[in-house]
Each structure stands twice: as structure tokens, then as C-alpha cells.
Image: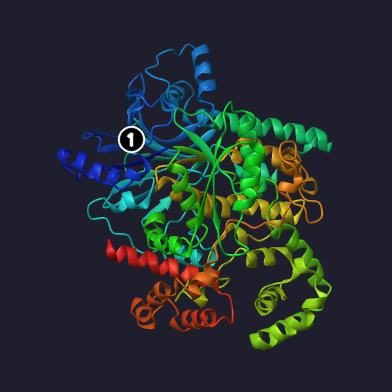
Amino acid sequence: MCGIAGFWDQRGTLAADAMPATLRRMTDAVRHRGPDDEGIWSDPKCGIALGHRRLSIIDVSPAGHQPMVSADGRYWIVFNGEIYNFEDLRRELESEGVAQWRGHSDTEVLLAAFGRWGVQQTLQRTVGMFAFALWDTKERTLTLARDRVGEKPLYYGWHQGMLLFASELKAISAFDGWCGSLDRAATAGYFRFGYVPAPRSIYNEVAKVPAAHLLTVREGQRVDPPVPYWSVRNVTENPNSGKFETDERVLVEELDHLLRRSIARQMISDVPLGAFLSGGIDSSTVVALMQKQSSRPVRTFSIGFREEGFDEAGYARAIAAHLGTDHTEFYVTAQDAIDVVPQLASLSDEPFADSSLIPTLMVARLARRYVTVALSGDGGDELFAGYTRYPMAQRVVRGLALIPAPLRYALARAIEATKPEYLERIGQWIAPLVPRAYQFKSFADRLYKAAEVLPLADVPRFYRRLVAQWPDPAEVFLDSPPTESLIDSDGYFARFASDIDAMRALDLQTYLPDDILVKIDRSAMSTSLETRVPLLDQGLIEFAWRVPVWMHIQGDQTKRLLRKVLYRYVPPALVERPKMGFGLPIGIWLRGPLRDWAEDLLAEQRLRDDGLLNVAAVRRYWLQHVAGERNWQYRLWCVLMFQAWRASLAAA
């Protein structure tokens, strides 16, 4: 895992002797991604410059140093990530007569494969996570590329006629004289979803290379349209339905095999390796199969919270004890969160409102004390239909469809017009009649949320509401342009055999790469930890979509096949419990230890001076939350992270 940066100055704006210093400022900005080594290379005649910061994982010798040139001198590359099947590719290349090796790094194998098979065909053969910049000295072209699902980031943009690219925006902003302007459409997307949807960045001048794509830049500043070398849409919308296997035992066996293979590949490392363990289905499966294939106890890491309803550390501890891992845990306090919050805006580079970035950062820091590589269980919800919103959406919409629309609208208006204290009294009256598992801490807040979805009697609209932080960004962001997203595509749900498949496919292409994988990458790389996500192996993605959805979800039980594999190694009693997620008691902390920090960012005069947000709306939501009338933690966190990001720019 590394950090890359570079530029192509086709106009010759920079003097030759200025190129190295300029490039080094860019790579220094991402030093945290690669503290072990640094390298720069430039060709003043062409104006091309490639920079690299190295976190040594495979072939930690000088033979793995980058930028790296191919044996024939044609290609120069800076590469971030891992090619898990590089040894297979190396043997295949050797069988075809390629035998010039200086070391045993995956980057060297990749360069040799480009020369033998070409870039696109090589990437179709690779299994891995990566982002790279490749300079072809013969064709005088620069190719930027990312892995299939977007595990590794890669930004690119223009400044005074020069192409800039890097792993993180902070490297681009380190270029002399660079100044980005706010992309209002990207900002509207941020307020709607809590993250900046790809391919936009928060700046007009910068974009993200799409996952599973190559982007080629040619002389004359010509940028070819991104070319896919793999398509998640083809996998999800056109699965190989000719050979559906509906024998559950056969499918469980195949899934077990695919998981073992993916995890074994991703356990290859020349440095200490471990895993995050939350105690949930996904991370427990990854750790169980790691331990099954390891000759020594696997290092596992988890964090916990003292607040009731947020702590999973005990579950992780029990699973670690059963599997015999070498387990380490850390309990997070409100003060720990307060100490981390001011760092979030700088860490994520652009506004990012997933509060689980905090615990992810903390578990990454914990793991980095002991290991350099950690496997994560992310991706299981999208592949194996694990989000509770999937069955809930269908169930709730079916129920809503039974209620006449006028009655639903009237009921919603009545709830919204009722004061929370009256709703809480109603909740107290009916609480004895409700099973314990379905009781809520705030009956009023639950009813208010129900009022928001009462008018939504179809799954697409219901799903769009569930994944939105601010359903209408214009409510908070002044002069907000319309948001454009795959989620809004007319007829998208009609392409799938089931609404659940449509929701899974949307999450796989939006929420996973733009939120989950960003969170993992930034939190881990900020502490120089490489994370790997074995559930996102290409074979597993394609397997998960060949299986009929009714075999993933039966009733309210999600991830049925994945659970069956896990039960081979862990007793069901250790993992069967309601899904908790990796959340934080943000709503509680905003009324307590984080209140002063939030008050400063949401001060009325400050909001007016900024001139970007609807002051009345923001203050109304904040005061209702502080008073305990409503729980607006998600919407407020979205605003707070935007304000914190702007403050970090002003302080830079």
C-alpha cells in the first residue's frame, strides 16, 4: 500500500530543475500512506513526473522501489495496492518466455505483463486492489487506472494546462498555486448522501477515476473517455443465470472454497498481518478462515463503547476465544472521540459524514501498533444481502400499499404536527403491549421517522429516502442544484428480478465505493496501515450474483449462505443477534461532550458569514436536537463535517 502523485506539464511551464521539488511537495503530502521509502522520477523533455511513497509489504528490498521502470525501458509506473495473484501471473509470463526479474514484487510482474499482453488484457487477468499511473515512453501516453470496485483512490485534474493526479486531494492541493473552486453539484450530492458521489470531487477542477476503468491522456492534452476493463453492471444486471445451482449444500461448499482462496491470497505478506474483528457475520467469517489457514494465532483487533446499545466488543471477544486468535481490544470514550473529531476533515480531504469513520480510525490505530496489514470484513452486506433495509423496504412498502394514500398522507401530517411529549405519553401507554425486542428508547422519534416514509408506497422511493441524509439538499444548501445519481435512474429497478437485487446493485456501485471503501482507506492509511477486503474478490462478487436472492434472504434472516459457511467454524449462538453496525452514540455526544465544538461550527453569525447554508433550517434542527425533541444526529453530522472541512481549508 502506498501513495502516488504526479503531473504532466505538456506546455513546459515548469523549469526542469523545478520539477523534482514540486513533485516532492506532492508526495510529502501523502507521506502517511508510505513512510518506508520515497521515490521520484521525471522526464523534463516530456514534462512527465511520477512520485511515490512506499509502505513496504511485498518484497521489502530495494528491488521494490518505485517509480519502477519495465525491463525493456518502455514503461514507468507508480503503483498503489496489491496484486494478489501476481505469483500466478509471473509463472504464466515465465511459461511464455519472460524471465528477466530483478526482485519478487507484484509491481514488477505487472510491468512485464503490460509489455506482454497490453494494459487492458493484463488488468482483466489481475486479482487485486490498486490505483496506478503508467507512462508509456513509446506512445507518449499516461494511463490512470483503478481496481474493480474502487478500493484504492485516484484523483486527477487540471491546473494551468497541467494534468495533476494523486491518491489524495491533499497532494494535488500541494502543487504550487493550485486553488480549487467548490463544485456545487458535488456539494449537493454530499448533503444528500453524506459523501461526494463519484466521479465528482468536491472541486470543479478535479475528478475521480471510475472504478474498473482505464483513463488515457495523450499529447495535446487529449483525455480519452474512461474505458472499462470489467463491469459491475454486467455482473449485477446480467448474471450467469444459465446454471443456477439451488442445492444449498453445493452452494455453501462453493462459497467456502471461494472464501478460502480469496483469504489465503490476501494473507500473503512479508510484514505482520492481522484482522479487524467486530463480532459480526462478515468479520467473523474472514477471521475464522484466516485462522483455519494459519499455523499460528491470528492477530485480531476490536474496539468497544461504554454506552449501552453500541458495544460489540464482548461478542468479538467470545468469537476470538472460540477461534483461538491473539485478540486485542480497546474501549473508546467520549473523550477519545472528541480528540479525533478535529482530525476528520483533514483526514478525508473532502466532506465526509459517515460517523463510523471515528471507530474505524481507532481500530486502525490500534491494529497498527502490532501489524502492518489488516483484513476487513466489509463488502458482505452488498454481496450477500446483509442490510436490514433490504427486507424491511419490501415489508414496509407492502404494508403501506394496503393503506389508502389519502389516509397515509393525513396520518403523516398528524404525527408531524404533534409535539414529542404527547407522542412519548402514547408510547408509555402502549409499551406494555409491545414485545421487548420492538420497543424503542424514543417512541416519538420513531413515529416522526415513520411519518417521513408513510407517503412512500413503492420500493424505489422508499430506498432513496433510506439512503439519504438530507432527502432534499436544497433545504440546507442554498441555491442547491439538482442531484444526479444512478439511484434516480428511471426504470432502474425494472432491470432486476427483485427489488432487493436492485438495491444491492445500487449499493455496490454507490455506497460501497464512495462511502465504505473511502472510510477504510483514509482511516487506515492515515496511520500507515494497509487494509485488504477479501469479500470483494471478483470471484466472490460474481458468485454472489449467480445465487437467487431468495437463497440469500429468507424471512428476516439475511446472508443465509454466508452464515452457513460461518457455522462450520463458529457456533450460531455466538453470532446470531440483531445487526448493530459500526455506529457511535453521536446523538448523545452532540448534546454532551461534543456540544461546544458543534455550537462553534453552527453559530448563527458564522453560518451567515459563510453564505452557503440555510441558517434558519440548520439552527432549527440543532435546537430541536439539543432540546431532545428529535434525534437529528445524521443530518447535523452532515452539516458539521461540511463546516469542519471548510474550517480546515481556512486553517491550511
Q: Nearer the viewer, residue 612 or 330?
A: 330
Q: Position of residue 193 (x, y in %)?
A: 54, 63
Q: Quadrant of residue 409 in the image?
A: bottom right
Q: Position of residue 508 (x, y in %)?
A: 61, 49
Residue shown at 44% from the left, 64% from the top: 335
The residue pinned by badge 1 equals 36
Mark 1, other Cα within 10 Å: few <14 / some 14–19 / many ≥20: some
The N terminus sits in image quarter: top left
Residue shown at 60% from the left, 49% from the top: 278
The C terminus sits in image quarter: bottom left
Q: How many numbered dots are placed on residues in this image?
A: 1
Question: Is residue 158 placed above or below 423 in the rendered structure?
Answer: above
Q: Amino acid at mark 1?
A: Asp
Question: Is residue 257 placed above or below 307 in the rendered structure?
Answer: above
Q: Position of residue 302 (x, y in %)?
A: 55, 48
Residue shown at 40% from the left, 14% from the top: 100
Could you tell whether 543 is left or right of 94 in the image? right
